[in-house]
Image (cartoon, coloured by chain):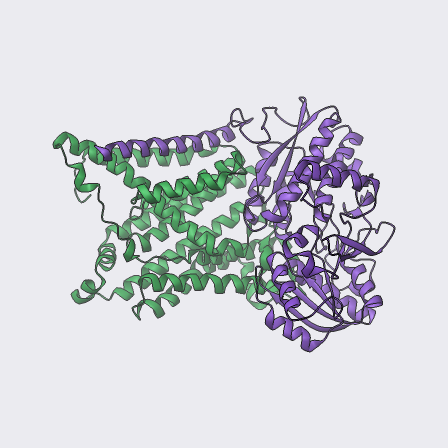
Chain colours: A green, B purple
Amino acid sequence: MQLRTLTPQRIYILIGYAVAATALFCAPLYLNDFRLNLLAKFLAFAIVALGLDLIWGYTGILSLGHGVFFGLGAYAMAMYLKLEASGGRLPDFMEWSGLSSLPLFWKPFESFGFAVAAGLLIPALLALFLGYFTFRNRIKGVYFTILTQALVIITTTLFIGQQAFTGGTNGLTGFSTLFGTSLAGTGMKHTLYYVTAALLIVAFVLCRVIVKSRFGKVLRAVRDGENRARFIGYNPAVYQMVVFSISGALAGLAGMLFVLHVGIISPSMMGIVPSIEMVLWVAIGGRGTLVGAALGAILMNSAKSVFSENYPDAWLFFLGLLFVIVVVFLPKGLVGLFSRITFRKRKESEEHDGAAAISHPAVRAGNG
Amino acid sequence: MRKRVWSSVLLLVLSLSLILAGCGSNNGGTAPASGGAETASGGSNSGSSGDGSEIKVGILHSLSGTMAISEKSVHDAELMAIEEINAKGGVLGKKLVPVIEDGASDWPTFAEKARKLISEDKVATVFGGWTSASRKAMLPVFEEMNGLLWYPVQYEGLESSPNIFYTGATTNQQIVPAVTWLLENRGKKFYLLGSDYVFPRTANKIIKEQLKAEGGELAGEEYTPLGHTDYSTIISKIQQADPDVVFNTLNGDSNVAFFKQLKDAGITAQDMTTLSVSVAEEEIRGIGADVLEGHLAAWNYYQTTDTPENKTFVENYKAKYGADRVTADPIEAGYTAVYLWAAAVEKAGSTDVAAVKEAAKGLEWNAPEGKVTIDGENQHIYKPVRIGEVQADGQFKELWSTGEEVKPDPYLKGYDWAASLSSGG
């Protein structure tokens, strides 16, 4: 990886990127509106997966609470859309929940700029806040993971309970326009798709820059030996907080895009199951590789859609089988499989039994 | 050597699954779908639903997740209605072909599948939904794409979408008459207990207004999260408040826990009246008739409802799905929805949404619950209201009924005390 020479493998990777970018760019040509909308949703999920990979794959922090950050971003955008759809009147759910005027904290969401800023900053700040109290106190591993689960339960309970302010279990839905243009139009759908694809690429590049930088090296050092990194003079807590917060913001960004594509956000989308699903995308795609995380999110969600459409009675079994296969046989995910194959071919031509060395990848499951 | 075999097997499995996934998406890309006809229903290749010898209709309920236990029965009843209609020659001489999707108890999934049914399968109509949240999630999709949804469950009212027909009760066909009846027959002091989501909260707001207007008294109000199972604290609170009536809007598993613990606390139906609006025959099977005996419920239909249509309906349902199965209000409403739609299509001579809506106005049909009529204005249906008492065999005995059908009034415009609730219009 560190070599800058153009090995055949490198060329393949570059070609892969080019193909992926072209496929994304041309998607509206070969997908109808419905499929394009689904793809756009999956691309938004890929952004969460990138953020998760940043903390889990590269820093060794397993968060089972990313649904919350995703949800907060989604709610910020949904509040803006709901206010726009209500056209100056009180949103419908507030009316039947007994509010007579718009709550103060809803007011700023009339501005699109504020909504976007809130959708990025609120998750980032919440992550920073949580990180400050955990990483600084050297709470890590499974204890941190449990805390993130607690965060999920607290947040969903709060959102369900405060029906007058959040729409309760129904969540927020019934949006009509964005900037006065109908969300339903083909033009709008294409625009939103391209915005999402572009943001995914931006997020990807951002994550790649982070990972390749000195900062990224420290992250990996913290993952592989937190105490060593500390003795060398780095403060792991600071690095963990910053990367956790970036990861939260990426989830928030994905949430905002999700609402634009799907048209609904409810507390169930930020619950425990979606939070775990997000981690599964990363695990299945390939933890510790950005491409793997993004691909995992897109492929797993495509598989879910396709299985459930074709086998409405049994799709969960197929999906479960796929999970089991990957988890048991492919500890490095799909990307691990492909690199293993290409790598083996090369090795085989060099020496007879070289494959054995890499078929036991060090899996740091316990480190998460 | 072994390793190599393993990875080739794996590669094979994975690429197969990916190819499968790819195929599916491609099918979608090149409408109308050409392959993928493995669905139980046998998804067919006919293009849009007006032509050909078939009409596709969507069935969209949760077949997995927490709501599956309730929604599966409605799904079954709808399929039965479709089969019956097909046996009699179909609609407009064409066979109905159900396209089944799984809402998976997840609201965004309901929206996604609704969109898929309308845009990919080009179904003429969709029968589906159970929770209010799933309906609210699907509503914008049906309005945006001008589809048609038939929603079969009693709900909290305050809604009337031009693209939805509501075949379950709205509040003035279930909750409001039940409260009036309780005030007249069981006492003035009400304790409101519900699951923490939109239906109970909205229902209780309405009940509180009604109590104020009709001389009732609120003894307490309590919400528990969906799936909550420890009611000992709440039961002692209820005992302290000593109400005449517990109005129960709990949903799902919570009912099992609540009624069992109520019985364990030594409170029987003789000591205190409870009236539930989400406990039907199906739930009694799960909770146990011995636990629920003597408790009340308000619905529009019971399996014991005495009409010739119901006799046939119950017989057919049991014959098809098993003698141990029971029918219940939402099951009947789902069944009725299919027949009402079919009648409207016959009358309109086409499956065009606007034409069907126009033809549906004032349409009458003899449903198992009695004669029902579609209100053209709000697309709800006129239905009779019944209060029933659970018997030892798990069936209801009708204590009271409105006799005639009650006009649906989702915004409670006919009630002065509800003025503050219905400003939404």
**Residue B334 or B145: which is nearer the viewer?**
B334
Residue B67 vertical placement versus A126 (above, below): above
Q: Position of residue A20 (x, y in %)?
A: 36, 35
Q: Which residue lies furthest to the bottom in this view?
A: B240
Residue nearer the viewer, B212 or B403: B403
Residue lying at 57% horizontally and 61% vertically, measured from the top left: A166
Seen as rendered, the residue at the extreme top is B52
In the picture, residue B44 is in which quadrant? Answer: top right
Horizontally, residue A175 falls left or right of residue A200, namely right
Relative image position of residue B25 (x, y in whole percent): 47, 32
Determine whether, in the image, residue B298 is placed left or right of residue A343: right
Which residue shows up at 73% across the image and 36% down it? Answer: B316
Residue B197 visible, this orientation: no
Taking depth in this image into account, of B8 and B26 the one nearest to the observer is: B8
Q: Residue at x 22, y 58 (%)?
A: A218
Can the viewer see residue A85?
yes
Residue A103's spot in the image, x, y percent? 60, 67
In the rendered view, would you say B285 is above or below B28?
Answer: below
Instruction: Please tell me whether residue A349 is drawn above or below residue B233 in the rendered image.
Output: above
Q: In which quarter of the image is the C terminus of chain A?
A: bottom left
- Vertical relation: A162 (above or below) A313: below
User: Where does the image place residue A215, in percent across and percent down from the top left?
Assistant: 24, 57
Frontmost residue, A258 versus B3: B3
Quadrant for the N terminus of chain A, please: top left
Return the residue found at the far right: B404
Find residue A360 and report its image quarter: top left
Question: How many numbered circles does the render carry?
Answer: 0
